[in-house]
Image (cartoon, grey):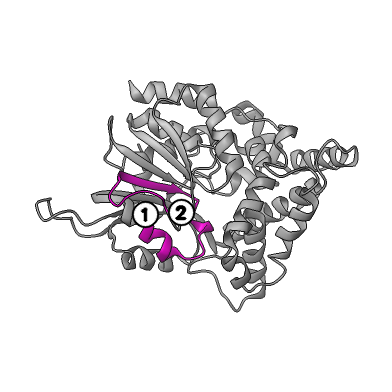
């Protein structure tokens, strides 16, 4: 059935490797050095205003520079996952996507929007799992190009497509989609209410918006210098204009008009820490997941010196070494934030656009139970 074919597709489509041709995204190789410096300059200060005011440039530069590294490290699905101790990372990523898809109430013929879709790994998986037609919204031309290539290569071009647009201004009519979701993408938005309001607008009445959001937690202390340093590392290493608390995300959803069905930080219910895949000091188990070696301390070191050699020999564009460095800084910030409990990458919410008067009333808002992530 759909479950079996979807898993087979996931196995076939999640291969990863470094493609030197793609290391600068859509940037000309002569532009990468300046683009890298301009990007780093956005994060020279803690004040978020310069980044939020130029968020389109911040995010586009980041993904032009970083996408090839993401594909190398993560395959086609650029996100973390709720994970049980018996799962490989790949298995948990597929289940994480299926869990979200199961909340959308969609099937064949439904129209779904993936907000901030990357190169389309999740949208291809969710389209295969549900049978729905899934459109990926992305404002980065290079990622859309890669996604279109991958759709064709995997045969998912029949019910998967892309639209190049800013999620703060979605070029679709009101009430276009039966469901909308986002996976670790709207953390790039300069204003959560503005972003969620656009999602609300294009969603049909009664439709569901499901989301995995990156957030600061109650453990974060703005007065703690170490906490602020970790926050800044997470921002520069992941192309984020700002960082929001879980309470701010929940409040923004309500201000945008949504009714909250579920909300939970899934980090609290996982067997394996969410940051484990990028923790350089973790135990490497080649018999379980051989390719995870690339994010161990040894794997990181080998990659770092390989990038240095490629740039020195002028095979890789100028600035590639700097990209590798700020990505490493971002990974270290995420690990530190996870270990201290001040940051989560899977604050999960399910919200609904109020239905028409003829629809069934919504049950009382609830916290998702701890076992909710099990399938």
How dense is the environment of label 2, judged by Cα within 10 Å: few (below 14), some, or many (20 and up)? many
Quadrant position of residue 258: bottom left
- The answer to whether residue 85 shows anywhere in this view is yes
Q: From the viewer's perspective, is 330 left or right of 375?
A: right
- Mark 2 and mark 1 in contact? Answer it, CB < 8 Å: yes
Residue 258 as seen in the image, left or right of residue 301: left
Residue 296 placed where, x, y %?
A: 71, 41
Query: Label 2: which residue?
Result: 167
- Segment colored magenta: 170-199
**Residue 180 highlighted magenta (yes or no):** yes
Across and down, in percent, residue 9 comes to 47, 23
Sequence-wise, which precedes: disc 2 or disc 1?
A: 2
> In the rendered view of the protein, which quadrant contains the C terminus?
top left
Extreme residue toward the left, this view = 358
| Residue 302 located within the stretch drawn in magenta | no
Residue 298 placement, left or right of 250: right
* Circle on res. 33: none
Q: Is residue 297 above or below residue 159?
A: below
Residue in view at x 53 percent, y 48 percent: 139
Taking the spot 70% from the left edge, 58% from the top edge, the residue there is 39
What residue is disc 1 on? 199
Instruction: Compare residues 355 and 168 and report the one nearer the observer.
Output: 168
Q: Residue at x 29, y 52 (%)?
A: 174
Q: Is residue 91 above or below residue 60?
A: above
Q: Secondary structure at mark 1?
A: helix
Query: Dot 1: few (<14), some (14–19), or many (≥20) neighbours within 10 Å?
Result: many
User: In the image, residue 92 lies at what x, y percent?
Assistant: 48, 37
Point out the image quarter for the N terminus.
top left
Q: For numbered disc 2, what is the local secondary structure? A: loop
Calculate the distance from the C-alpha at mark 2 to the C-alpha at mark 1: 8 Å
Could you tell me residue 333's position as x and y percent?
65, 58
| Residue 285 seen anywhere in this rendered image of the structure | no
């Amino acid at each position: 059935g759909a479950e079996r074919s979807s898993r087979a597709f996931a196995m076939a489509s999640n291969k990863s490797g470094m493609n030197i041709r793609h290391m600068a995204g859509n940037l000309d190789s002569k532009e990468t050095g300046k683009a890298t410096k301009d990007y780093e300059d956005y994060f020279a200060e803690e004040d978020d205003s310069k980044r939020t005011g130029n968020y389109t440039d911040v995010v586009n530069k980041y993904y032009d520079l970083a996408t090839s590294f993401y594909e190398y490290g993560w395959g086609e699905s650029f996100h973390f996952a709720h994970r049980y101790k018996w799962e490989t990372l790949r298995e948990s990523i597929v289940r994480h996507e299926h869990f979200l898809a199961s909340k959308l109430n969609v099937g064949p013929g439904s129209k779904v929007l993936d907000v901030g879709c990357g190169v389309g790994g999740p949208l291809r998986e969710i389209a295969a799992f549900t049978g729905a037609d899934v459109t990926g919204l992305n404002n980065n031309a290079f990622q859309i190009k890669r996604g279109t290539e991958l759709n064709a290569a995997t045969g998912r071009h029949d019910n998967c497509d892309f639209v190049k647009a800013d999620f703060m201004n979605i070029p679709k009519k009101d009430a276009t989609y039966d469901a909308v979701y986002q996976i670790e993408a709207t953390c790039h938005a300069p204003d959560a209410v503005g972003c969620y309001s656009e999602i609300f607008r294009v969603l049909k009445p009664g439709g569901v918006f499901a989301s995995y959001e990156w957030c600061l937690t109650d453990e974060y202390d703005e007065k703690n210098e170490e906490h602020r340093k970790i926050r800044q590392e997470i921002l520069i290493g992941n192309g984020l204009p700002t960082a929001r608390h879980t309470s701010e995300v929940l409040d923004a959803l309500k201000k945008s008009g949504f009714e909250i069905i579920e909300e939970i930080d899934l980090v609290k219910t996982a067997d394996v820490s969410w940051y484990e895949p990028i923790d350089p000091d973790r135990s490497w188990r080649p018999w379980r997941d051989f390719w995870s070696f690339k994010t161990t301390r040894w794997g990181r070191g080998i990659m770092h010196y390989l990038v240095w050699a490629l740039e020195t020999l002028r095979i890789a564009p100028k600035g590639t070494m700097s990209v590798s460095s700020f990505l490493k800084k971002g990974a270290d910030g995420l690990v530190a934030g996870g270990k201290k409990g001040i940051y989560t990458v899977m604050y999960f919410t399910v919200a609904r656009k109020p239905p028409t008067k003829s629809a069934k009333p919504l049950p009382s808002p609830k916290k998702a139970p701890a076992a909710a992530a099990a399938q």
